[in-house]
Image: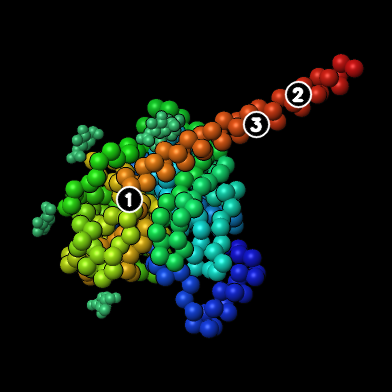
């Protein structure tokens, strides 16, 4: 990743001084099984890395399609908290890849979009990851009736404890491991906020839900770094966004997910804002296409 030199300098300085920047660990998937294509699942990719090292190499987070033009993800995917001051990605350097299973091999159902704009929650806290939610506006529209890519439903009521959810992504399958080539998914049960607070020995903020196991099965199951921003789904409904946790698949620590229901008003308002912006972009594009034609006619006639 290309960072301004100053930021690199500050990071190095902090590392030298033994300061840790950003207190939460972002996540990838541990103990999942290979998944087929999931119609709402997207890979967010760094366009520069994709260009330099090949398609798929720039994968940094996941997201979920919530309308034909908008994608929901975690704020910490767009605001890089491992450097200080936090580095905010540029929308023009993000590719949103949909309809993909093997990260490195697009198929006939794969569609990639650039990003016109994004909005992250202004209350996002880069130290404790509170309000870890963001939305992207893609530069184009998913074809209506696409069988491989379509929006996931939003929740209208809270999810019961123990509901068996699906979490998916291309994240590492073990802590500090590389991304996986294939989309993986795991089944994790919803954990009550009381049990989750007990596990972490801290009161969790509002706006998060927990899912995972206290006593890990023989093969640990959890989300891990690189699955960040990815969907936690139950009954074909998006209940959570992969946010953070203690390590990956660490005994006794369920994963923490942004609570989609809690942010439903923010989601609705931001979705409206971005769609309005989209119609504005559309008009701008129309102007760019038609004005030169108009002027060339003008010049030819006179
Ligand atoms: C959830 O499952 C656990 C373990 O099976 C059980 O002990 C607990 O009572 C369940 N909780 C609810 C609310 O169903
Ligand atoms: C839990 O947190 C409290 C207050 O911060 C602290 O006093 C206690 O030692 C912690 N317990 C464990 C097991 O870490
Ligand atoms: C699953 O979703 C359907 C339709 O969206 C709804 O009618 C049903 O109540 C949901 N089931 C559960 C267990 O939430
Ligand atoms: C977002 O806005 C579009 C266009 O108005 C609408 O079709 C879609 O249902 C909205 N989605 C959400 C999740 O608010
Ligand atoms: C979402 O926004 C639309 C348009 O502003 C509004 O009509 C609708 O009631 C809102 N829905 C919710 C669930 O807030």
Spot occupied by residue 63 in the image (x, y as percentages of width and height): 41, 48
Rendered residue at 51%/41% (across/down): 137
Rendered residue at 70%/31% (across/down): 288
Spot occupied by residue 223 in the image (x, y as percentages of width and height): 32, 60
Tell me the distance, in whole angstroms, between the alpha carbons under discs 3 and 1: 36 Å
Please name whichever residue, 220 or 256, is drawn nearer the observer in this view of the structure.
256
Q: Is residue 273 above or below residue 44?
A: above
Q: Which residue is mark 2?
A: 293
Rendered residue at 90%/17% (across/down): 302
Spot occupied by residue 214 in the image (x, y as percentages of width and height): 19, 65
Screen quadrant of the N terminus: bottom right
Q: Which residue is mark 3?
A: 285
Ligand 4 within 8 angstroms of badge 3 C-beta = no
Task: Looking at this view, name the residue that lies furthest to the top.
Answer: 301
Q: Of circles 3 and 1, which is in front?
A: 1
Whether residue 13 is visible? yes
Q: Is residue 125 left or right of residue 160?
A: right
Q: Earlier in the sequence, mark 1 or mark 2?
A: 1
Tell me the distance, in whole angstroms, between the alpha carbons under discs 2 and 3: 13 Å
Q: Secondary structure at mark 3?
A: helix
Ligand 4 within 8 angstroms of badge 2 C-beta = no
Is there CB contact under 8 Å for labels 2 and 3? no
Q: Is the residue marked by circle 3 packed among few (<14), some (14-19), or many (20+) residues within 10 Å?
A: few
Please name whichever residue, 214 or 144, is drawn nearer the observer in this view of the structure.
214
Q: Of circles 2 and 3, which is in front?
A: 3
**Label of residue 259 in the image:** 1
Which image quarter: residue 265?
Answer: top left
């Amino acid at each position: 990743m290309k960072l301004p030199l100053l930021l690199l300098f500050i990071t190095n300085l902090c590392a030298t001084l033994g300061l840790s920047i950003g207190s939460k660990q972002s996540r990838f998937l541990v103990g999942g099984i290979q998944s087929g294509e999931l119609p709402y699942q997207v890979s967010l990719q760094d366009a520069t890395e994709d260009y330099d090292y090949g398609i798929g190499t720039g994968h940094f987070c996941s997201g979920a399609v919530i309308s034909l033009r908008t994608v929901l993800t975690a704020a910490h995917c767009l605001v890089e908290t491992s450097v200080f001051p936090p580095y905010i990605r540029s929308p023009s350097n993000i590719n949103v890849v949909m309809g993909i299973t093997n990260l490195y091999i697009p198929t006939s159902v794969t569609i990639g979009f650039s990003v016109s704009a994004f909005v992250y929650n202004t209350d996002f806290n880069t130290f404790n990851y509170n309000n870890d939610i963001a939305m992207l506006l893609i530069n184009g529209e998913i074809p209506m009736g696409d069988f491989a890519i379509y929006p996931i439903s939003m929740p209208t009521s809270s999810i019961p404890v123990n509901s068996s959810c699906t979490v998916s992504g291309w994240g590492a399958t073990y802590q500090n491991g590389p991304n996986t080539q294939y989309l993986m998914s795991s089944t994790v049960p919803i954990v009550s906020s009381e049990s989750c607070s007990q596990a972490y020995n801290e009161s969790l903020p509002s706006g998060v839900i927990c899912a995972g196991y206290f006593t890990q099965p023989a093969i640990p199951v959890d989300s891990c770094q690189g699955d960040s921003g990815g969907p936690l789904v139950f009954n074909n409904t998006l209940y959570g966004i992969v946010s953070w946790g203690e390590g990956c698949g660490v005994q006794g620590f369920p994963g923490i997910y942004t609570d989609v229901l809690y942010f439903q008003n923010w989601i609705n308002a931001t979705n409206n804002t971005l769609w309005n912006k989209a119609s504005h972009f559309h008009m701008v594009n129309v102007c760019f296409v038609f004005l030169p034609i108009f002027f060339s006619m003008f010049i030819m006639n006179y």
